[in-house]
Image (cartoon, helix red, strand yellow):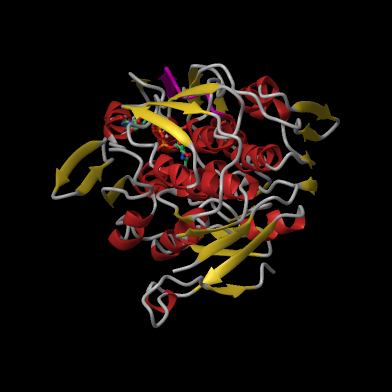
Amino acid sequence: MEGFRVTGGEKIQGQARLQGAKNAVLPILAAALLPEGETVIRDCPDIRDAQAMAGILNTLGCACRLENGQARVDSGRLCRWEMPEELSKQIRSSIFLLGPILGKLRRATVTFPGGCDIGLRPIDLHLKGLRALGVRIREDGGVIHCDGGSMRAGNVYFDYPSVGATENVMMAAVLLPGITTIHNAAREPEIEDLQNFLNVLGGRIRGAGTKVIRVEGVQSLRGAVYTPIPDRIVGGTLLCAAAATGGEIELLNARPRDLKPVTEKMKEMGCGVWEMEDGLALKAPEKLRAFSPLHTRPHPGFPTDMQAQMLALSCTAEGESVIVENVFENRLSHVEDLRRMGADIQVCGRRALVRGVAALHGARLRARDLRGGAALVVAALGARGESTVERADLIDRGYDHLETVLSGLGARVERLTGGEDERKNESGIAAPFSARSAG
Ligand code: UD1
């Protein structure tokens, strides 16, 4: 099992360029099985979730290659509609394939999806949306069989604006004759990016970014070259890393409007934030201040994917910060590790009260989920002394070589390799992992 060794106290300083957003790339890769011909996705991050999605596409008969920051998908030989159980369990976003497979082959079988352990993450809204398009669905021991023989365009009403369910319906409907309207759609920037991608392929979709999306079915789609939007969550995490170390950073291609909910909170903490012609810059103050209560909400509210990193940052901010996680029911598991670093945090249900302490100290930590793991790295960067963060594999799901990016900004972060057993010395005391170059 791999981990990171972080030596705190070095100021983050410099420039970083963001790659394509994980949450844009994953549905786009799924949608790439819809067109005839080859699709090329540029700025594709080398992350585990994208590799897992590529693996599923290959198993379905598509040819998908991820290399040199590009994904190439040729859907010409798509022949299977059954998603492999093992791979589906690895990533939640395997559920995004349901819509496109149905749209193209009119039938699909999927195992209940996996992903981070941050709550129940049901798929009822995905299934409700597909049923509204005439899909007949049968669930049998964790396997979902979908028959799209009678699919037709229709009206879909979501009780809650689920990101994945909105995207699934868009992809299922793009090749359906007639007009599909999605009401109470999710409004995340990645939804708009999926719309733009599908339209570049020849689709006719509008309204993404608002609560109503209108999909006018087309007969066929053709392959294209596409560059997804930059990753606002990786960008936000790097801003937090800079703020935690009292440093400064320029995110060269960040889209300031996508990061607004995060940068507004960081301004409250005393950070200077500047919009650049093509990017964003942040300078941390000597001492961070607590922020006004932070409630995670669907876009344009505060993104749940940045909650953990902001919580880590608030641990050393002067005063009391309150954080309420409204989107997922089990997304405060990083608190336990932050307490091991000396943080003063009280949790009651979905609410965390953080009383800022003067400094955190290094500790042996363990990532429990993707963003919570990134938050521990942020905390360790600002802490006194050395920390190890176990389960780098969880962080690698959504960050492309985080240690390399942070090292390039002046931080001291190394990737460590070695299993549990190797980390015990003869006296049985846990020893550090062996270091691998940050590359
Ligand atoms: C996507 C993002 C994830 C982000 C989340 C919320 C991707 C690959 N992942 O996940 O990083 O944290 O949006 O911004 O884009 N729900 C149901 N029934 C459903 C679907 C969802 O009850 O059928 C609930 C979930 O359990 C959760 C909430 O709705 O509590 C939000 O989920 P959703 O918006 O669907 O998130 P994802 O698409 O899974």
Image quarter in which the C terminus is found: bottom right
Q: In which quarter of the image is residue 436?
A: bottom right
Report whether residue 101 is seen: no
Q: Is-magenta flag for residue 187?
A: yes
Image quarter in which the N terminus is found: bottom left
Q: Is-magenta flag for residue 55?
A: no
Decide: is 343 above or below 12. Answer: above
Decide: is 153 above or below 333. Answer: above
Residue 338 x %, y %: 47, 43
Q: Please name the residue shown 26% across and 40% down the image.
A: 149
Decide: is 362 above or below 132. Answer: below
Report whether residue 303 is seen: yes
Q: Please name the residue shown 28% across and 36% down the image.
A: 122
Q: Which of 159 and 16 is in front in this view?
A: 16
Q: Please name the residue shown 65% across and 52% down the image.
A: 8
Farthest right residue in view? 277
Q: Give the range drawn in magenta.
A: 179-188
